[in-house]
Amino acid sequence: MAFLHFGSELKRFGRGKLPPLGFVVVMLLPLLFGGVFVSAYYDPIGGLSKLPVAVVNQDEGELDAGAQVVENLLEQDDIKFIEVSAEEAREGINDGTYYFGIEIPKNFSDSIASVTSDSPAPATVNAVFNNSNGFIASMLGNQVVNTVVETMDTEFGVRIVDNMLVGFSTLGDGMNQAAEGATTLSDGVGSANDGAVQLADGAVTLRDGIASANEGAQSLADGASQLDTGLGSAATGSQTLADGLSSLSAGTAQLGQGATQVSDGVGQLVDQVAPLTAYVPDINSQLITLRDGAATIASELSDPSSTYRSGVDSAVSASQQLAAGLQTLKDGSSQLSIGARTLADGTSQLAAGSEQLVVGAQALRDGTVQLDEGSSELALKLTDGASQVPTFADGADTTIATPVETEQAGDTTPLFGIGLAPFFMAVGLFMGATVAWMILHPISRRALDSRMGGFRGTLASYLPSTVLGLGQATIMWAVLYFLLDLNPAHPAGLWMAMVAISWVFISITHMFNNVAGPSAGRVLSIVMMSFQLVSSGGLYPPETQPAFFHWFHTYDPITYAVNLVRQMIFNETPSNDPRFIQAIWVLLFIWALMLAISTLANRTNKVLRMKDYHPELKV
């Protein structure tokens, strides 16, 4: 009943301190790999938002499409896009600051707008990768770039269709209508030019006529002034005449009274000289004649109805009317003189304005000549343009469908196995360093018993393992190089790096075995390996992992082993990458530190204890 013995086998793990602990550790070893790996790579895609990616915009086109693309990229939360200069991007991708880069070239906008040209070509987005930054990072970068390009294709494709194809479909009709309108404009401008010429000629004639009218108005003003002066003199004379005639009329009445008195006196004299008639027979007849004549004169001068008196009265009345009329005429002539002077001033201004009209009309004539020439040329050009409305060349449909394409610069993405080779090589070498102490003794009892110094005792157990490590690294290198066509950039450098890494890893496992003992040391080596695998950045970038693994990445020896192997496989000039020198110095420091710790541990290992003869747990 063999099954009853399994209880006895388990009972031995209940005694002492190390057996129970070892039993628990062995139970947890699968969890270290299963749980740690699942935790480390739980959601690497979700961690891409922490992955630094360089974006360079060198677009110089008027469309400024590059700036729009960069703005959209910087607004995304899925990837940590950082806009930098071309030099900063180059240096950052080379030293691992940025995992990859996206460059918008100078002709990006011009290529977007080339869909209507004779040679349409898609715009190019340059994706720059560095395999030294990790294979998975390059793969993720390719996916990111493809997604970005697909987004650009959709966005710019819709813009091209909306803003260009629709416009060009109606451009021909619009150009034809514009050409017809320009032709009509040219005809109208020609007619306007003829009218402008006639207007200029008429303006000259008008100017000459106004000049003549101005001269006549000046003469009229002078004549009106002279007339006003003459009428003033006539009015004064007529008033004097009226006054004289009035005096004459008054004197005539008095003269008539005097003539009556003379007639009466002569009549009395006739009566008085009647006795003398005998002596002077003619005197009486003469006195009678004198009397009658005086009576007649008195009658003419005193009787208003007499011819003389009525004539004098008519003359007085007429002279008064003449004086009044001349005064009215004088007042009118004054107004005429003022109006004539105003007219003369107005015609002077009109003459000056007509001169300006002539200048303006001539300028209008010259302008319409130029306008006629320009409108004719416009009609000709629009007609030519209507016949030259761009048609889409062959390939425009492809350019519209995919206006943006990717052009990969820098390193090309290798095959999957080659891309992950640095990680698997480092893991294999650490595994070899762990199992090396399953056949070799990590502690040289002979060296310790012979009273060798601590460091010499350490070398006594360490140096034999370096021969095994040399063989492991050389065999792995030969298989990869000759059978799997790894084709590294530096074959000899890769071999030396693998040997050096093997020796460093052996020093680490050697230290664990010296400090904790062979059994616990092997377990610690396996535990250490599990954490190193997921923190090294050999698969996914550490930025995509939880914070603990990202922190441990900096102190992980496999991190620097992977970086060193990547430099030897992918980088033609590793000296330009600071990670190359960094890896060498860090691994050298780890190697020296591990040997120093092993040397200190060997000082206590010189004393044999009961547990050394009868260990509680053997692995």
Image (spheres, grey):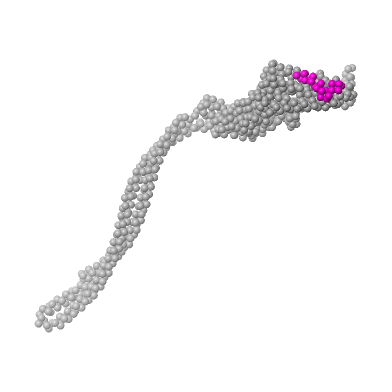
Q: Which quadrant does the N terminus fall into?
A: top right
**In x, y percent, where is residue 574?**
67, 25
Relative side of 335 to 49, left or right: left
Q: Nearer the viewer, residue 275 or 192?
A: 192
Residue at the image point whose x is 85% and y is 26% from the top: 603
- Quarter where residue 511 is shown: top right
**In x, y percent, where is residue 444?**
84, 21
Q: Which of 329 and 110 is in front in this view?
A: 110
Give the extent of the magenta segment: 447-470
Q: Is the magenta stretch mostly helix, strand or loop?
A: helix
Q: Which of 454 and 614 is in front in this view?
A: 454
Q: Which quadrant does the C terminus fall into?
A: top right
- Quarter where residue 146 is shown: top right
Above or below: residue 266 compared with residue 552: below
Residue at the outermost bottom position: 275
Residue at the image point whose x is 68% and y is 17% from the top: 485
Residue 452 covered by magenta stretch: yes
Residue at the image point whose x is 75% and y is 17% from the top: 471
Residue 16 covered by magenta stretch: no
Residue at the image point whose x is 21% and y is 73% from the top: 301
Relative side of 506 to 157, left or right: right
Above or below: residue 356 compared with residue 41: below
**In x, y percent, where is residue 13?**
87, 24
- Quarter where residue 41 is shown: top right
**In x, y percent, where is residue 472?**
75, 18
Q: Which of 558 and 358 is in front in this view?
A: 558
Q: Is residue 516 visible?
A: no
